[in-house]
């Protein structure tokens, strides 16, 4: 068996130096089947066999730590760290089999030990690399890996049991997107667990989404240039502190989604770049291996071990950290070989096309594996093009995601509200067009961090008019968004109408919530979330056209639209939005059923900072339009009593 497995792989070390599994090291983390699965790219729990693993006696006494790393083209590998004064001559590692895996066991060392792998690459250079499978890292700018052994005892069993049966596409999902370092600077994971959880409960969000928390050296990348795909950033505490954060959220009934970045990685020599002196994780050819926009390297999705490494990373967060969703960043950059490239700067696929077939296969494997191994989670794609089948099952040749960010809705909606109200009549199709394709994918509506950076200003900045009109329009927009088909995502600060463009280097403008006008926006978002969570017409049939009916769709002159949302049982909620600064005192709306309708939300309410134009009750006659008061720059929701 060993001979058969090892004959498949090449190694820079001669066969005479290859050590059979466990032959010299009784504490090895790898067996024959592990080597076989790694070579085939099918070891879904890669973190259990590679990296640093503490070994103990049956009674719990520390024996030491086993280290292993994949470096198939290395000429030599040594373990360096605190234990040997970072001397590469002290602990040379042994190549294990022909897969290119090196290992060593060091007695007596355990949690907290800092280490790296000193690798003499195929180019004969010695470079000290962090462990690609590290569970913990030093606080940047320091770059060493740290041996970690968890002691966290999970207390979220009720949440995890319910998650297995969770049907996200038929559930209320309202996401608060957060950059941990600037929400309230200076807080640790454990402090955030208390303060952020309390805030989420108060504001009524069902989920939180974190900009990447995987370790990254440059804070200005917001976490999108990751160097450790298996370690939460040490900026806010230890891995167990982050588990505590997740645990507290779950016990409070709040789900957690992580941004995950398998599209590219930074060129830092101490990390993954040229890991064994060759382009191991990346492509050798820069037309395939370098990202022109971000100055980063692109993973080689066609290599079994690299694909395995990435799939295992996604699974690691879902299983080890109980994460409820993975939002995959920059999917479009992965799907197209010519993404951001001019003619002659890219290589076509084997059929002559621009589609990255290897990336497609990787994404399909990642989504299928995640849903199989962690039922009830969400795989979410940030995909900005018209690629077909992003949320179609892999069995039907789709990418297999549960949701796709609706970038078209975001773009058209923000374009519309940037027009002066008097000009919006000429752009009415921008605010209504999304319904034409609303069920082509399972969509999520994002007003994300990307919309309040790079000179775009805050959402409030984009809206014309005086101060009152800006705030009123923002409340109306949120009311329209929360009623529109699709799950909801709002970036931190937007819920209280942040004045300034967001920056990762400073706190949100929390002082604004001392002012009634900003607190009013905050209260309106809370009210929407509170109604949304229990109002099944607003989410139960999000992925079906039967859940939506236009009531008024062509009133461009009045800057107004009305539609009904339906539940499985036939319950209905009507949403009416007026993006004009003029109230419609006698507005005709064909309410879908006769009877008494009441307002359950009015963003023009005095308590939100509005003008108080409202309807005490509305009586609908069968077959006859109902005359309503529609407040200026506002959204109202009606429900049949």
Image: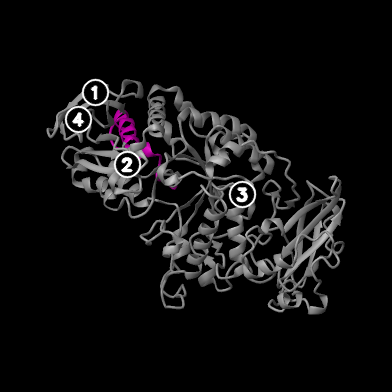
User: Position of 346 compared to 273: left or right?
Assistant: left
Q: CA distance from mark 1 to mark 3?
A: 50 Å
Range covered by the magenta-colored residues: 454-479
Does the image show residue 360? yes
User: Position of 452 compared to 63: left or right?
Assistant: left
Q: CA distance from mark 3 to mark 2?
A: 33 Å
N-terminal-most mark, 1 or 2: 2
Q: Secondary structure at mark 2?
A: loop
The residue indicated by pointer 1 is 613
Q: Residues within 10 Å of mark 1 (few under 14, many from 20)?
A: some
- Is 463 contained in the magenta span? yes
Residue at image point 34% right, 32% down: 475
Residue 309, label in figure = none
User: Most extreme residue toward the left, as rendered?
Assistant: 624
Q: Residues within 10 Å of mark 2 (few under 14, many from 20)?
A: many
N-terminal-most mark, 4 or 1: 4
Q: Secondary structure at mark 3?
A: helix
N-terminal-most mark, 3 or 4: 3
N-terminal-most mark, 4 or 2: 2
The secondary structure that dominates the magenta segment is helix
């Amino acid at each position: 068996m060993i001979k058969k497995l090892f004959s498949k792989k090449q190694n820079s070390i001669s066969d005479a130096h290859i050590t059979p599994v466990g032959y010299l090291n009784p504490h090895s983390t790898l067996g024959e089947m592990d080597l076989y699965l790694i070579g085939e790219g099918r070891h879904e729990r890669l973190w259990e066999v590679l990296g640093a693993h503490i070994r103990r006696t049956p009674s719990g006494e520390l024996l030491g730590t086993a280290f292993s790393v994949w470096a198939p083209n290395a000429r030599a590998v040594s373990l360096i760290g605190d234990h040997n004064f970072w001397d590469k001559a002290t602990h040379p590692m042994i190549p294990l089999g022909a897969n290119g895996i090196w290992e060593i066991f060091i007695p007596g060392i355990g949690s907290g030990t800092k280490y790296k792998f000193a690798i003499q690459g195929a180019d004969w250079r010695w470079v000290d690399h962090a462990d690609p499978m590290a569970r913990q890292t030093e606080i940047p700018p320091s770059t060493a890996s740290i041996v970690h052994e968890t002691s966290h005892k999970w207390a979220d069993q009720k949440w995890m049991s319910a998650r297995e049966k969770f049907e996200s596409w038929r559930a209320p999902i309202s996401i608060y997107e957060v950059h941990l370092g600037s929400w309230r600077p200076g807080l640790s994971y454990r402090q955030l667990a208390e303060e952020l959880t309390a805030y989420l409960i108060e504001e009524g969000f069902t989920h939180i989404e974190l900009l990447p928390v995987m370790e990254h050296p440059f804070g200005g990348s917001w976490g999108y240039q990751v160097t450790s795909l298996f370690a939460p950033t040490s900026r806010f505490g230890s891995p167990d502190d982050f588990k505590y954060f997740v645990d507290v959220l779950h016990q409070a009934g709040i789900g957690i989604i992580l941004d995950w970045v398998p599209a590219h990685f930074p060129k830092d020599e101490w990390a993954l770049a040229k890991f064994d002196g060759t382009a191991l994780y990346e492509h050798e050819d820069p037309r395939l291996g370098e990202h022109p926009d971000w100055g980063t390297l692109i993973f080689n999705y066609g290599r079994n071990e690299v694909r395995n490494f990435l799939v295992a990373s996604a699974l690691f967060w879902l299983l080890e950290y109980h994460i409820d969703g993975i939002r995959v960043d920059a999917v479009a950059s992965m799907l197209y070989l010519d993404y951001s490239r001019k003619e002659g700067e890219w290589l076509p696929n084997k059929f002559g096309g621009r589609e990255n077939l290897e990336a497609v296969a990787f994404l399909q494997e990642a989504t299928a594996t995640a849903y199989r191994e962690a039922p009830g989670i969400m795989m979410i794609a940030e995909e900005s093009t018209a690629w077909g089948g992003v949320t179609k099952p892999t069995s039907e040749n789709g990418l297999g995601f549960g949701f796709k960010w609706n970038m078209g809705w975001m773009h058209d909606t923000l374009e519309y509200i940037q027009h002066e109200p008097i000009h919006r009549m000429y752009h009415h199709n921008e605010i209504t067009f999304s319904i034409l394709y609303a069920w082509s994918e399972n969509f999520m509506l994002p007003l994300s961090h990307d919309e309040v950076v790079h000179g775009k200003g805050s959402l409030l900045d984009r809206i014309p008019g005086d101060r009152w009109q800006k705030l009123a329009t923002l409340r109306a927009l949120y009311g329209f968004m929360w009623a529109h088909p699709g799950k909801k995502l709002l970036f931190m600060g937007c819920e209280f109408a942040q004045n300034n463009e967001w920056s990762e280097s400073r706190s949100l403008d929390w002082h604004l919530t001392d002012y009634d006008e900003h607190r009013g926006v905050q209260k309106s978002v809370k009210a929407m979330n509170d109604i949304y969570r229990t109002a099944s017409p607003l989410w139960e049939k999000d992925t079906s056209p039967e859940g939506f009916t236009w009531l008024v769709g062509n009133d461009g002159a009045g800057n107004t639209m009305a539609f009904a949302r339906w539940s499985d049982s036939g319950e209905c909620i009507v949403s009416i939005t007026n993006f004009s600064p003029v109230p419609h005192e006698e507005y005709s709306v064909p309410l879908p059923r006769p009877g008494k309708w009441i307002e359950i939300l009015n963003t023009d309410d005095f308590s939100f900072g509005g003008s108080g134009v409202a309807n005490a009750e509305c009586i609908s006659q069968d077959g006859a339009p109902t005359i309503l008061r529609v407040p200026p720059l506002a959204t109202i929701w009606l429900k049949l009593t």
